Amino acid sequence: MSNDKATEPATAFAGWRIMRSDVGRLWASREQPFPPAAEQAGAYRTVDGDDLRELCRAIAEQESLAELAVTQ
């Protein structure tokens, strides 16, 4: 895997590290762990996607899940 700065729009993925696998799949790993309540609710710190749109959707899903878990 490589850190591909060209696929890392800083504002869209603030707090996430974006990597591209050897076969071109995109991965993102959250730089800070989610709070325990978010992890217990199923928020994943590492997600993947076939393209940038899919990866963005996966990140947004995890952040949304975490936010809902923490505010309850």
Image (cartoon, rainbow, N blue to C red):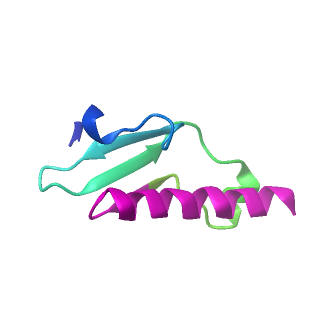
Q: Residue at x 36, y 38 (%)?
A: 8
Q: Nearer the viewer, residue 67 or 41?
A: 67
Q: Nearer the viewer, residue 15 or 44?
A: 15
Whether 54 is drawn above or below 35: the answer is below
Specify the principal SS of the magenta part. Answer: helix
The answer to whether residue 6 is left or right of residue 42 is left
x, y percent for residue 41: 69, 67
Q: Nearer the viewer, residue 29 or 14?
A: 14
Quarter containing the N terminus: top left
* Residue furthest out toward the left: 23
Q: Is residue 3 within the magenta segment?
A: no
The answer to whether residue 53 is left or right of residue 13 is left
x, y percent for residue 10: 45, 34
Q: Residue at x 16, y 54 (%)?
A: 24
x, y percent for residue 47: 42, 58
Question: What span is in magenta?
Answer: 47-72
